[in-house]
Amino acid sequence: MKYINFDFAIDESFDINSYEQIALRAFTDLHIKRTGKMSGWLECEKLLKDTEKKQMFKIVKEVKKEADVLVVIGIGGSYLGAKAAIDFLSDYYKFEEGLEVIFVGNSLSEKYLIDTAKYLENKNFYINVISKSGGTLEPAIAFRYFKDMVEKKYKSEAKKHIIITTSKNSGSLRKISIREGYRTLFIPDNIGGRYSVLTPVGLFPIACAGFDVEKILEGAKETKEEVDSVSYRKNPAMQYAVIRNVLYKQGKDIEVYSTFNPNMRQFLEWLKQLFGESECKNFAGIFPASLILSTDLHSMGQLMQQGKRNIFETFINANRENVKNNLYLEKDKNDLDNLNFVTHKNINEINKIARLATMKAHREGKVPIIDISFEKQDEKTLGAMFYFFEYSCAISAYILGVNPFNQPGVEAYKKNIKEILNKK
Ligand code: PA5
Protein backbone atom coordinates (compact mmCIF):
# COMPACT_ATOMS: atom_id res chain seq x y z
CA MET A 1 0.00 0.00 0.00
CA LYS A 2 1.10 3.58 -0.57
CA TYR A 3 1.66 4.47 3.08
CA ILE A 4 1.68 1.12 4.85
CA ASN A 5 3.94 -1.93 4.50
CA PHE A 6 2.47 -5.22 5.61
CA ASP A 7 4.15 -8.54 6.29
CA PHE A 8 3.70 -11.55 8.55
CA ALA A 9 5.55 -14.59 9.81
CA ILE A 10 3.43 -17.47 11.01
CA ASP A 11 3.47 -21.22 10.45
CA GLU A 12 4.84 -22.31 7.09
CA SER A 13 1.67 -24.27 6.32
CA PHE A 14 -0.42 -21.10 6.57
CA ASP A 15 -1.88 -20.13 3.20
CA ILE A 16 -3.40 -16.63 3.28
CA ASN A 17 -5.11 -17.11 -0.10
CA SER A 18 -7.22 -20.01 1.11
CA TYR A 19 -9.27 -17.63 3.29
CA GLU A 20 -10.45 -15.44 0.43
CA GLN A 21 -14.12 -16.51 0.64
CA ILE A 22 -14.28 -15.79 4.37
CA ALA A 23 -12.89 -12.30 3.78
CA LEU A 24 -15.27 -11.66 0.91
CA ARG A 25 -18.27 -12.61 3.05
CA ALA A 26 -17.17 -10.08 5.68
CA PHE A 27 -16.63 -7.53 2.90
CA THR A 28 -20.22 -8.09 1.73
CA ASP A 29 -21.47 -7.68 5.29
CA LEU A 30 -19.64 -4.41 5.67
CA HIS A 31 -20.47 -2.90 2.29
CA ILE A 32 -23.79 -4.42 1.33
CA LYS A 33 -25.68 -6.65 3.74
CA ARG A 34 -25.32 -4.79 7.00
CA THR A 35 -24.03 -1.45 5.87
CA GLY A 36 -25.95 1.71 6.58
CA LYS A 37 -26.74 2.63 10.13
CA MET A 38 -23.23 2.96 11.55
CA SER A 39 -20.98 2.81 8.50
CA GLY A 40 -20.69 6.55 7.85
CA TRP A 41 -16.92 6.45 8.51
CA LEU A 42 -16.46 4.38 5.33
CA GLU A 43 -17.08 7.60 3.39
CA CYS A 44 -14.19 9.34 5.12
CA GLU A 45 -13.81 11.94 2.38
CA LYS A 46 -17.41 13.10 2.73
CA LEU A 47 -17.65 13.31 6.49
CA LEU A 48 -17.31 17.08 6.70
CA LYS A 49 -19.34 19.32 4.44
CA ASP A 50 -17.54 22.41 3.16
CA THR A 51 -19.62 24.74 5.33
CA GLU A 52 -18.86 22.67 8.44
CA LYS A 53 -15.17 22.62 7.57
CA LYS A 54 -15.17 26.38 7.13
CA GLN A 55 -16.86 26.90 10.48
CA MET A 56 -14.43 24.51 12.17
CA PHE A 57 -11.34 26.19 10.71
CA LYS A 58 -12.66 29.61 11.70
CA ILE A 59 -12.86 28.50 15.32
CA VAL A 60 -9.45 26.77 15.07
CA LYS A 61 -7.92 30.05 13.90
CA GLU A 62 -9.47 31.95 16.79
CA VAL A 63 -8.43 29.38 19.41
CA LYS A 64 -4.84 29.28 18.10
CA LYS A 65 -4.66 33.06 18.18
CA GLU A 66 -6.26 33.65 21.56
CA ALA A 67 -5.52 30.69 23.80
CA ASP A 68 -2.49 29.14 25.47
CA VAL A 69 -4.32 25.89 26.15
CA LEU A 70 -7.21 23.94 24.64
CA VAL A 71 -8.80 21.66 27.25
CA VAL A 72 -10.42 18.68 25.52
CA ILE A 73 -13.05 16.97 27.66
CA GLY A 74 -14.04 13.50 26.48
CA ILE A 75 -13.60 9.78 27.05
CA GLY A 76 -13.11 6.65 24.89
CA GLY A 77 -13.72 7.37 21.23
CA SER A 78 -14.28 11.00 22.12
CA TYR A 79 -10.61 11.56 22.96
CA LEU A 80 -8.31 8.64 22.13
CA GLY A 81 -7.96 9.43 18.42
CA ALA A 82 -7.04 13.09 18.90
CA LYS A 83 -4.57 12.24 21.64
CA ALA A 84 -3.02 9.50 19.49
CA ALA A 85 -2.68 11.87 16.54
CA ILE A 86 -1.18 14.75 18.49
CA ASP A 87 1.41 12.51 20.16
CA PHE A 88 2.23 10.81 16.85
CA LEU A 89 2.86 14.12 15.07
CA SER A 90 4.47 16.13 17.87
CA ASP A 91 8.02 16.41 19.10
CA TYR A 92 8.66 14.66 22.40
CA TYR A 93 8.98 18.01 24.21
CA LYS A 94 7.25 21.26 23.43
CA PHE A 95 10.03 23.41 21.97
CA GLU A 96 7.96 26.15 20.43
CA GLU A 97 5.43 28.64 21.72
CA GLY A 98 1.94 27.81 20.62
CA LEU A 99 -1.27 26.26 21.72
CA GLU A 100 -1.08 23.27 24.02
CA VAL A 101 -3.84 20.65 23.92
CA ILE A 102 -4.60 18.78 27.15
CA PHE A 103 -7.17 16.09 27.88
CA VAL A 104 -9.50 15.72 30.87
CA GLY A 105 -12.82 14.06 31.59
CA ASN A 106 -11.43 10.60 30.90
CA SER A 107 -11.20 9.71 34.58
CA LEU A 108 -12.87 10.62 37.85
CA SER A 109 -9.64 11.52 39.58
CA GLU A 110 -10.39 14.43 41.88
CA LYS A 111 -6.73 15.37 42.08
CA TYR A 112 -6.40 15.42 38.31
CA LEU A 113 -9.31 17.85 38.02
CA ILE A 114 -7.97 20.09 40.77
CA ASP A 115 -4.42 20.04 39.40
CA THR A 116 -5.66 20.80 35.88
CA ALA A 117 -7.62 23.78 37.19
CA LYS A 118 -4.50 24.95 39.02
CA TYR A 119 -2.44 24.56 35.84
CA LEU A 120 -4.96 26.67 33.95
CA GLU A 121 -5.26 29.41 36.58
CA ASN A 122 -2.97 31.92 34.90
CA LYS A 123 -3.43 30.71 31.37
CA ASN A 124 -5.80 31.71 28.63
CA PHE A 125 -7.86 28.68 27.69
CA TYR A 126 -10.79 27.36 25.69
CA ILE A 127 -12.65 24.14 26.39
CA ASN A 128 -13.87 21.66 23.83
CA VAL A 129 -16.26 19.16 25.34
CA ILE A 130 -16.84 16.11 23.17
CA SER A 131 -19.56 13.54 23.77
CA LYS A 132 -21.73 11.95 21.12
CA SER A 133 -24.39 10.79 23.55
CA GLY A 134 -23.97 13.92 25.63
CA GLY A 135 -24.65 11.92 28.77
CA THR A 136 -21.41 10.16 29.74
CA LEU A 137 -20.69 10.85 33.39
CA GLU A 138 -16.91 11.45 33.40
CA PRO A 139 -16.88 14.19 30.75
CA ALA A 140 -20.18 15.60 32.04
CA ILE A 141 -18.64 16.10 35.51
CA ALA A 142 -15.48 17.65 34.07
CA PHE A 143 -17.55 19.92 31.83
CA ARG A 144 -19.62 21.26 34.69
CA TYR A 145 -16.44 21.89 36.70
CA PHE A 146 -14.51 23.69 33.93
CA LYS A 147 -17.61 25.52 32.65
CA ASP A 148 -17.90 27.07 36.09
CA MET A 149 -14.23 28.03 35.98
CA VAL A 150 -14.64 29.58 32.52
CA GLU A 151 -17.70 31.54 33.65
CA LYS A 152 -15.90 32.92 36.70
CA LYS A 153 -12.79 33.78 34.72
CA TYR A 154 -14.23 35.15 31.49
CA LYS A 155 -17.61 36.46 32.76
CA SER A 156 -19.53 37.98 29.80
CA GLU A 157 -16.99 36.48 27.37
CA ALA A 158 -17.39 32.94 28.77
CA LYS A 159 -19.57 31.61 25.97
CA LYS A 160 -16.82 32.24 23.44
CA HIS A 161 -14.48 29.90 25.33
CA ILE A 162 -16.71 26.83 25.14
CA ILE A 163 -16.92 24.69 22.01
CA ILE A 164 -19.22 21.67 21.98
CA THR A 165 -18.82 18.58 19.80
CA THR A 166 -21.87 16.34 19.93
CA SER A 167 -24.75 14.76 18.04
CA LYS A 168 -26.99 17.13 16.08
CA ASN A 169 -30.23 15.52 17.11
CA SER A 170 -30.06 14.18 20.65
CA GLY A 171 -28.51 14.25 24.12
CA SER A 172 -28.17 16.68 27.01
CA LEU A 173 -25.08 18.32 25.56
CA ARG A 174 -27.02 19.29 22.45
CA LYS A 175 -29.76 20.71 24.68
CA ILE A 176 -27.19 22.71 26.63
CA SER A 177 -25.53 23.96 23.46
CA ILE A 178 -28.85 25.20 22.03
CA ARG A 179 -29.94 26.80 25.28
CA GLU A 180 -26.64 28.54 25.99
CA GLY A 181 -25.86 29.31 22.34
CA TYR A 182 -22.45 27.62 22.39
CA ARG A 183 -20.68 27.09 19.10
CA THR A 184 -21.18 23.44 18.17
CA LEU A 185 -19.49 20.97 15.85
CA PHE A 186 -21.43 17.86 14.94
CA ILE A 187 -20.71 14.14 15.04
CA PRO A 188 -22.66 12.40 12.26
CA ASP A 189 -25.31 10.04 13.66
CA ASN A 190 -24.03 7.16 11.52
CA ILE A 191 -20.55 7.13 13.08
CA GLY A 192 -19.78 5.59 16.47
CA GLY A 193 -17.27 7.02 18.96
CA ARG A 194 -14.27 4.83 18.14
CA TYR A 195 -14.72 5.37 14.39
CA SER A 196 -15.03 9.16 14.74
CA VAL A 197 -11.46 10.45 14.66
CA LEU A 198 -11.87 11.77 11.11
CA THR A 199 -14.86 13.92 12.16
CA PRO A 200 -14.64 17.11 14.28
CA VAL A 201 -14.17 14.79 17.29
CA GLY A 202 -10.56 14.29 16.24
CA LEU A 203 -10.01 16.93 13.60
CA PHE A 204 -10.79 19.99 15.72
CA PRO A 205 -8.27 19.30 18.54
CA ILE A 206 -5.67 18.05 16.04
CA ALA A 207 -6.01 21.22 13.94
CA CYS A 208 -5.81 23.37 17.09
CA ALA A 209 -2.55 21.59 17.94
CA GLY A 210 -1.19 22.92 14.65
CA PHE A 211 -1.40 19.91 12.34
CA ASP A 212 -2.74 19.74 8.81
CA VAL A 213 -6.01 17.84 9.05
CA GLU A 214 -6.64 18.15 5.30
CA LYS A 215 -3.58 15.96 4.80
CA ILE A 216 -4.88 13.46 7.36
CA LEU A 217 -8.12 13.27 5.39
CA GLU A 218 -6.17 12.90 2.14
CA GLY A 219 -4.17 9.98 3.53
CA ALA A 220 -7.38 8.33 4.69
CA LYS A 221 -9.07 8.89 1.34
CA GLU A 222 -6.15 7.45 -0.62
CA THR A 223 -6.16 4.40 1.62
CA LYS A 224 -9.90 4.00 1.26
CA GLU A 225 -9.48 4.06 -2.53
CA GLU A 226 -6.76 1.45 -2.28
CA VAL A 227 -8.66 -0.96 -0.01
CA ASP A 228 -11.78 -0.53 -2.13
CA SER A 229 -10.06 -1.26 -5.40
CA VAL A 230 -7.58 -4.07 -4.79
CA SER A 231 -8.51 -7.72 -4.58
CA TYR A 232 -8.22 -9.70 -1.36
CA ARG A 233 -4.91 -11.21 -2.44
CA LYS A 234 -3.32 -7.79 -2.58
CA ASN A 235 -5.29 -6.25 0.26
CA PRO A 236 -3.39 -6.00 3.57
CA ALA A 237 -6.36 -4.49 5.40
CA MET A 238 -8.41 -7.61 4.69
CA GLN A 239 -5.50 -9.98 5.16
CA TYR A 240 -4.73 -8.53 8.58
CA ALA A 241 -8.36 -9.16 9.59
CA VAL A 242 -8.18 -12.73 8.32
CA ILE A 243 -4.87 -13.55 10.02
CA ARG A 244 -6.16 -12.31 13.39
CA ASN A 245 -9.17 -14.60 13.14
CA VAL A 246 -7.17 -17.61 11.99
CA LEU A 247 -4.79 -17.18 14.93
CA TYR A 248 -7.70 -16.68 17.32
CA LYS A 249 -9.16 -20.00 16.19
CA GLN A 250 -5.78 -21.59 16.97
CA GLY A 251 -6.10 -20.40 20.58
CA LYS A 252 -4.13 -17.15 20.27
CA ASP A 253 -6.58 -14.97 22.10
CA ILE A 254 -4.25 -12.11 23.02
CA GLU A 255 -2.90 -9.68 20.42
CA VAL A 256 0.07 -7.67 21.61
CA TYR A 257 0.69 -4.44 19.71
CA SER A 258 4.40 -3.60 19.92
CA THR A 259 6.11 -0.41 18.90
CA PHE A 260 9.65 0.87 19.02
CA ASN A 261 8.38 4.45 18.72
CA PRO A 262 7.46 5.77 22.18
CA ASN A 263 5.31 8.50 20.62
CA MET A 264 2.97 5.78 19.38
CA ARG A 265 1.89 4.76 22.88
CA GLN A 266 -1.41 6.57 22.46
CA PHE A 267 -1.95 5.23 18.98
CA LEU A 268 -1.80 1.74 20.49
CA GLU A 269 -4.34 2.87 23.12
CA TRP A 270 -6.62 3.97 20.27
CA LEU A 271 -6.14 0.56 18.61
CA LYS A 272 -6.92 -1.28 21.84
CA GLN A 273 -10.21 0.54 22.16
CA LEU A 274 -11.06 0.12 18.48
CA PHE A 275 -10.53 -3.63 18.46
CA GLY A 276 -11.53 -4.39 22.05
CA GLU A 277 -14.86 -2.58 21.89
CA SER A 278 -15.67 -3.62 18.35
CA GLU A 279 -14.93 -7.32 18.69
CA CYS A 280 -15.09 -8.59 22.24
CA LYS A 281 -18.73 -9.59 22.60
CA ASN A 282 -20.77 -12.69 23.41
CA PHE A 283 -17.93 -13.79 25.72
CA ALA A 284 -15.49 -14.09 22.83
CA GLY A 285 -12.86 -12.02 21.06
CA ILE A 286 -9.17 -11.19 21.10
CA PHE A 287 -7.79 -9.28 24.10
CA PRO A 288 -5.71 -6.36 22.75
CA ALA A 289 -2.61 -5.43 24.74
CA SER A 290 0.33 -3.14 24.01
CA LEU A 291 4.07 -2.89 24.58
CA ILE A 292 6.39 0.07 24.19
CA LEU A 293 9.84 -1.18 23.26
CA SER A 294 12.65 -1.34 24.14
CA THR A 295 11.21 -0.28 27.55
CA ASP A 296 8.87 -3.26 27.96
CA LEU A 297 11.39 -5.80 26.71
CA HIS A 298 12.79 -5.41 30.19
CA SER A 299 9.47 -6.01 31.89
CA MET A 300 7.31 -8.12 29.58
CA GLY A 301 10.02 -9.55 27.32
CA GLN A 302 10.26 -12.70 29.40
CA LEU A 303 6.55 -13.39 29.01
CA MET A 304 6.69 -12.71 25.29
CA GLN A 305 9.60 -15.11 24.85
CA GLN A 306 8.65 -17.96 27.15
CA GLY A 307 5.19 -17.41 28.65
CA LYS A 308 1.96 -19.18 27.71
CA ARG A 309 1.74 -19.41 23.92
CA ASN A 310 -1.71 -17.84 23.59
CA ILE A 311 -0.39 -14.61 22.10
CA PHE A 312 0.44 -13.14 18.73
CA GLU A 313 2.32 -9.92 18.22
CA THR A 314 1.61 -7.08 15.81
CA PHE A 315 4.54 -4.72 15.37
CA ILE A 316 3.53 -1.20 14.38
CA ASN A 317 6.45 1.08 13.64
CA ALA A 318 7.71 4.07 11.72
CA ASN A 319 10.81 3.09 9.77
CA ARG A 320 12.05 6.54 10.64
CA GLU A 321 10.73 8.98 13.23
CA ASN A 322 10.62 12.63 12.18
CA VAL A 323 14.13 13.92 12.79
CA LYS A 324 16.10 16.45 10.82
CA ASN A 325 19.57 14.97 11.29
CA ASN A 326 20.90 11.49 11.81
CA LEU A 327 22.29 10.88 15.27
CA TYR A 328 25.58 8.96 15.49
CA LEU A 329 27.67 8.26 18.56
CA GLU A 330 31.24 9.56 18.39
CA LYS A 331 34.14 7.07 18.35
CA ASP A 332 35.96 7.01 21.69
CA LYS A 333 39.71 6.45 21.69
CA ASN A 334 39.66 4.26 24.83
CA ASP A 335 36.41 2.47 24.03
CA LEU A 336 36.02 1.33 27.65
CA ASP A 337 32.28 0.80 27.19
CA ASN A 338 32.97 -1.29 24.02
CA LEU A 339 30.58 0.77 22.01
CA ASN A 340 32.79 1.80 19.10
CA PHE A 341 31.26 -1.06 17.15
CA VAL A 342 27.92 0.77 16.90
CA THR A 343 29.31 4.13 15.79
CA HIS A 344 28.90 3.38 12.08
CA LYS A 345 25.10 3.16 12.48
CA ASN A 346 22.77 6.00 13.43
CA ILE A 347 20.42 5.50 16.38
CA ASN A 348 17.40 5.03 14.12
CA GLU A 349 19.18 2.15 12.35
CA ILE A 350 20.09 0.63 15.71
CA ASN A 351 16.45 0.91 16.81
CA LYS A 352 15.43 -0.89 13.61
CA ILE A 353 17.95 -3.63 14.27
CA ALA A 354 16.57 -3.97 17.80
CA ARG A 355 13.16 -4.45 16.19
CA LEU A 356 14.42 -7.15 13.81
CA ALA A 357 16.25 -8.88 16.63
CA THR A 358 13.11 -8.85 18.78
CA MET A 359 10.93 -10.17 15.97
CA LYS A 360 13.41 -12.98 15.35
CA ALA A 361 13.58 -13.89 19.03
CA HIS A 362 9.81 -13.88 19.48
CA ARG A 363 9.31 -15.86 16.29
CA GLU A 364 11.81 -18.42 17.58
CA GLY A 365 9.76 -18.42 20.77
CA LYS A 366 6.79 -19.49 18.58
CA VAL A 367 4.95 -16.17 18.65
CA PRO A 368 3.19 -15.48 15.32
CA ILE A 369 4.31 -12.07 14.06
CA ILE A 370 2.49 -9.45 12.01
CA ASP A 371 4.58 -6.50 10.87
CA ILE A 372 2.93 -3.20 9.93
CA SER A 373 5.35 -0.39 9.20
CA PHE A 374 5.41 2.96 7.46
CA GLU A 375 8.07 5.35 6.27
CA LYS A 376 7.14 8.64 7.89
CA GLN A 377 5.36 9.95 10.93
CA ASP A 378 3.37 12.58 9.07
CA GLU A 379 -0.26 13.56 8.59
CA LYS A 380 -0.94 11.54 5.44
CA THR A 381 0.49 8.38 6.97
CA LEU A 382 -1.58 8.92 10.08
CA GLY A 383 -4.79 9.34 8.06
CA ALA A 384 -3.91 6.16 6.17
CA MET A 385 -3.39 4.26 9.40
CA PHE A 386 -6.65 5.43 10.95
CA TYR A 387 -8.58 4.25 7.93
CA PHE A 388 -6.61 1.03 7.51
CA PHE A 389 -7.27 -0.10 11.07
CA GLU A 390 -10.93 0.99 11.20
CA TYR A 391 -11.51 -0.96 8.00
CA SER A 392 -9.61 -4.04 9.15
CA CYS A 393 -11.36 -3.96 12.48
CA ALA A 394 -14.84 -3.91 10.94
CA ILE A 395 -13.92 -6.77 8.56
CA SER A 396 -12.37 -8.72 11.42
CA ALA A 397 -15.48 -8.33 13.60
CA TYR A 398 -17.72 -9.55 10.79
CA ILE A 399 -15.45 -12.58 10.27
CA LEU A 400 -15.81 -13.26 13.99
CA GLY A 401 -19.58 -12.90 13.63
CA VAL A 402 -20.18 -9.85 15.82
CA ASN A 403 -21.52 -6.35 15.20
CA PRO A 404 -18.46 -4.03 15.16
CA PHE A 405 -20.47 -0.92 15.89
CA ASN A 406 -22.15 -1.45 19.25
CA GLN A 407 -20.69 -1.66 22.75
CA PRO A 408 -23.34 -3.13 25.05
CA GLY A 409 -20.73 -3.84 27.75
CA VAL A 410 -19.71 -0.22 27.99
CA GLU A 411 -23.32 0.89 28.12
CA ALA A 412 -23.96 -1.51 31.01
CA TYR A 413 -21.37 0.16 33.23
CA LYS A 414 -22.56 3.63 32.27
CA LYS A 415 -26.12 2.67 33.33
CA ASN A 416 -24.97 1.09 36.62
CA ILE A 417 -22.93 4.07 37.76
CA LYS A 418 -25.92 6.35 37.35
CA GLU A 419 -28.27 3.90 39.05
CA ILE A 420 -25.98 3.50 42.06
CA LEU A 421 -25.46 7.25 42.37
CA ASN A 422 -29.23 7.82 42.21
CA LYS A 423 -29.89 5.47 45.16
CA LYS A 424 -30.56 7.36 48.36
O1 PA5 B 1 -16.71 3.92 20.84
C1 PA5 B 1 -17.62 4.33 21.54
O2 PA5 B 1 -18.76 4.52 21.11
C2 PA5 B 1 -17.37 4.66 23.00
O3 PA5 B 1 -16.08 4.34 23.38
C3 PA5 B 1 -17.62 6.13 23.25
O4 PA5 B 1 -16.77 6.91 22.44
C4 PA5 B 1 -17.39 6.49 24.73
O5 PA5 B 1 -18.13 5.65 25.54
C5 PA5 B 1 -17.79 7.95 24.98
O6 PA5 B 1 -19.13 8.15 24.63
P1 PA5 B 1 -19.70 9.59 24.39
O7 PA5 B 1 -18.99 10.24 23.28
O8 PA5 B 1 -21.15 9.39 24.07
O9 PA5 B 1 -19.52 10.36 25.68
Image (spheres, grey):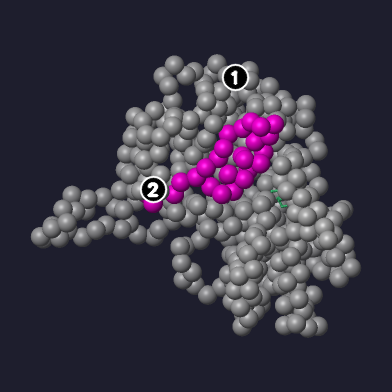
Instruction: Count neighbours of disc 1 (C-alpha within 10 A) and say few if under 14, some if 14 to 19, many if 20 or more.
Output: some
Decide if residue 254 is on the left or right side of residue 107. left
Check residue 133 in the rendering and tell me which mark sits there, or answer none.
none
User: Where are the magenta residues, as a range?
Assistant: 268-295
Q: Quadrant of residue 244?
A: top right
Give the CA separation, mark 2 to mark 1: 38 Å
Task: Specify whether residue 270 is in view.
Answer: yes
Q: Residue at x 49, y 18 (%)?
A: 15
Q: Earlier in the sequence, mark 2 or mark 1?
A: 1
Which residue is situated farthest in the left direction here? Answer: 334
Residue matched to label 1: 20
In-front residue for pair 321/37: 37
Closer to the camera: disc 2 or disc 1?
Answer: 2
Q: Amino acid at mark 1?
A: Glu
| Residue 184 among those drawn in magenta | no
Instruction: Count neighbours of disc 2 (C-alpha within 10 A) and say few if under 14, some if 14 to 19, many if 20 or more.
Output: few
Check residue 299 in the rendering and tell me which mark sits there, or answer none.
2
Instruction: Using the image, determine if residue 180 lies above or below residue 31.
Output: below
Decide if residue 310 is on the left or right side of residue 391. left
